[in-house]
Amino acid sequence: MRGFKDSAISEKIPFWLDPRKRAIFFQLLTFCMVGFLAYYLVSNTLINLERQKIASGFGFLHKESSFEIGESLIPYSAASTYTRALLVGALNTVKVAFIGIVITIFLGTIIGVARLSSNWLVSKLAAIFIEVMQDIPVLLQLFFWYALFCETLPSPQEALTPGAGISVCNRGVAFTIPEAHPAHRYMLLAILAGCVIIYLMRRWARKRQEKTGQFFPTFRVGIALLLGLPFVTWLTFGAPLKMDVPVLEGFNFQGGVMVSPEFIALLMGLILYTSAFVAEVVRAGIQSVSKGQKEAAMSIGLRPSLVLNLVILPQALRVIVPPLTSQMLNLTKNSSLAVAIGYPDFVSVANTTINQTGQSIEGVALIMAVYLFFSLSTSAFMNWYNKRVALVER
């Protein structure tokens, strides 16, 4: 009876006074206004392009690029299409972002823990690193590292050779690598198989510890698997030892792997700048855990390293992960500054494409779409990880 009265009263209320109907009306009105504005901008742009005799569309992607790219993870030449050129730039950006994120998290965690060290010297050195790196703009750091490699290091003819088949010069750093062999592919598969086994083993060990209280040394067993499986695979294929050593031929090194000064400068600048912020995130996360947790862990005889790994860090992750995601996104987006030092990332390749084709709107749209994809992918992964490490309340 009461529900009938409420429905009868709601029918008498005008729609502009009903909060639900009014909210739907304003949402539809906003949607129509945004759609009209988008239609006006797109149609006006197309009319102006046609008036200026400028071709529009993405048909240029299938044309020959006619320019070289210094670094590429996939085969590429000037005869390749613009699509392949842009793919090369995107892969270069992914390479820098992935390596940079991994090293940044590792370095930032170490510096953040060192910032809270009881050792006065270690704590102050970490604090100085954080303050200095945060206060120097990342673009200035890129210029510094690039100038350090190109201006202070010798030419390839006078390259520094610290040993182990490494040569350092103003053309970059040349490394000795194992010569191509079928064993290497299977060793990589062995490493991937080891990662899967470790993941399953950690789940089993966690459930076993919850039921019986017995601790399983997953870290040591995991290291043994990651090293042992590839080693056994290497022995199975006859233990190939032939190396591809970089040799000076003319004005540069041939063979091995050559890492360009642009890549090194970009990586160094991004890592050092972002790791300072990650260190502060880690420090704040650790300090968010109450001291009673540490004291309780110490009272049952846990070593300081186990207290950090098993008690403090798991609880601190709920505070660390959200701002850490922002820093990972910042590193990925800051990689677009590579154009300032000549590293062929996606922005650099897209700018070259725009200059050659005149398709500025399409080029900028591609840049926006690619970086939006990188950002959303990173956020989705970190949100998934954040849910995995979140504390479950009972």
Image (cartoon, rainbow, N blue to C red):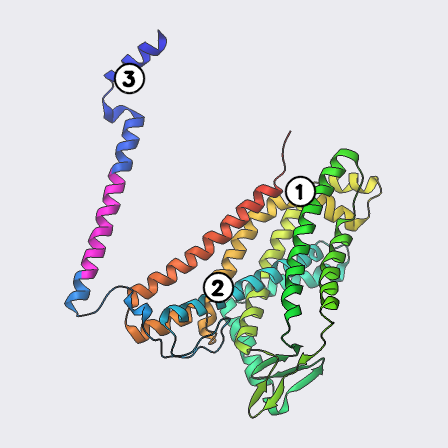
Which residue type does callout 1 highlight?
Gln
Residue at the spot of label 3:
10
- Distance from disc 1 to disc 3, alpha carbons, whole Å, reads 49 Å
Point out which mark residue 315 bears.
1
Which residue type does callout 3 highlight?
Ser
**Above-or-below relation of 139 to 167:** above
Q: What is the magenta segment's predominant secondary structure?
A: helix
Question: As drawn, which residue projects farthest toward the right?
Answer: 301
What is the x, y in percent for residue 390? Answer: 61, 40
Residue at (62% x, 58% y) in the render: 105
**Occupied quadrant, residue 244:** bottom right
**Above-or-below relation of 183 to 278:** below
Which residue type does callout 2 highlight?
Asn
Q: Does the magenta run of residues contain 392?
A: no
Q: Residues within 10 Å of mark 1 (few under 14, many from 20)?
A: many
Residue at (31% x, 27% y) in the render: 20
Q: Secondary structure at mark 3?
A: helix
Q: Does the magenta run of residues contain 36?
A: yes
Residue at the spot of label 2:
334
Q: Give whichever of discs 3 and 2 has the lower sequence position.
A: 3
Point out which mark residue 239 bears.
none
Which portion, as a residue range, is magenta?
29-46
Residue at (72% x, 79% y) in the render: 164
Do tag 2 and tag 1 residues touch (Cβ < 8 Å)? Answer: no
- Distance from disc 3 to disc 2, alpha carbons, whole Å, reads 54 Å
What is the x, y in percent for residue 83? Answer: 37, 68
Direction from residue 351 to residue 302 in the image, left or right? right
Q: Give whichever of discs 2 and 1 has the lower sequence position.
A: 1
